[in-house]
Image (cartoon, helix red, strand yellow):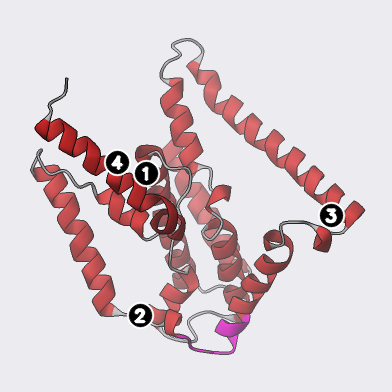
Amino acid sequence: MAFWGFCVSIAGCLVWYWYHGMRLGVALAVLVLMFSWFLVYARVVAQGGVTVVRNMWVMPQVIEGIAGAGVFSRPGAVIASMQNLLLMEMPSTVLAPMAMNAFRISQVFKKRRRLFVPALFAAILVAMACTGYIVLSQAYRHGAVNFGDTWPVQQLPKATFGEAQRIINFESTPHSRFYLRPFSIGVVGMGSLMFMRARFYWWPIHSLGLLCLSSWNMSNRLWFPFFLGWLAKASIMRFAGGR
C-alpha cells in the first residue's frame, strides 16, 4: 500500500509539474534531487542526533549546470526555484526526520500502533492550520514587513523570484556551473568513508560527519566541538578503558 501510494504521489507531482509548464525530464530530475535530499537529511538528523543541517547546493543550479542554460522553461524556472527555497533551503519544513524519530519512539508502545499514522497525519494538519492562521492574522494585523524575522517575508521572496529571473534571463554565475573535479572528490571521499565503515569494524570515522561538514551551521558552530568530544572519548577509551 505504501509503495503504490508513493508511486501515485510521484505521478501526481509529475503531472502537476508538466501541467504548469515544466518539461517532463526536468520535472523528473527535480523530484529525484529533492527526494534524495529528503532521505539524506532524514538520515543525518535522525541518526546523527543533530537538530538541523543545511545543504550547500541549489537544486535548479545543479540541473542547469549539468544540462546547460535553457533547460528550464519560464514557468519551470519559477516552480523549481520555489520548490528549492521552500523545501530544501528551509530544512525545518521537511518533516521526514521528525517522522523517522516518531516511528522509532512508537516502537516502545505495543498497543494500538495502527492508530499512530492517522494520529501523526492529524497532528500535522492541525499544526498547519494553526500556524497558518496565526501567521496570516499577525501579518494582516501588524504588517508583515514589521516582523522581527525578515527572512520569510522579505528575503525569501526576493531570493526565490530573483533566482527564477536569473534562470529565465540566462544569467550565468559561478554557482550555476557544474564542476567535475569537486564533484568527483566528493563522490570518492564519501564512497571511501562508507566502504571503510561497512568493511572494517575498527574504522572510527563515520560518513555522516562529512555530510554535516558541508552545512554552514555545523561547520561554523558545532563540528569542531563535536570533533573534540569524539577525540576525548576515543582517547579515554583507548588509554583508560571503559571503566
Task: Measuring from the top left, give residue 36's x and y in whole percent.
Answer: 39, 55
Disc nearer the start of the sequence (2/1): 1
Tell me the CA gap for discs 1 and 3: 35 Å
Residue marked by disc 1? 43
Classify residue 220 by image quadrant. bottom left
Distance between mark 2 and mark 3 Cα atoms: 40 Å
Q: Earlier in the sequence, mark 2 or mark 3?
A: 3
Q: Could you tell me the amino acid type at mark 1?
A: Arg
Residue located 43% across and 84% down the image: 174
Q: Residue at x 27, y 78 (%)?
A: 180
Label 1 to label 4: alpha-carbon separation = 21 Å
Determine the residue positioned at 11% across, 34% down: 238
The foreground one among 152 and 66 is: 152
> Which label belongs to residue 139?
3
Furthest-right residue in view? 141
Viewer-nearest of labels 1 and 3? 3
Residue 21 appears in view: no
Give whichever of 177, 75 is nearer the camera: 177
User: Label 2, label 4: how many angstroms apart (C-alpha)?
Assistant: 36 Å
Residue position for label 4: 229
Label 3: state its secondary structure. helix
Is 118 in front, or is 9?
118
User: Which image quarter is the C terminus in?
Assistant: top left
Magenta residues?
165-173
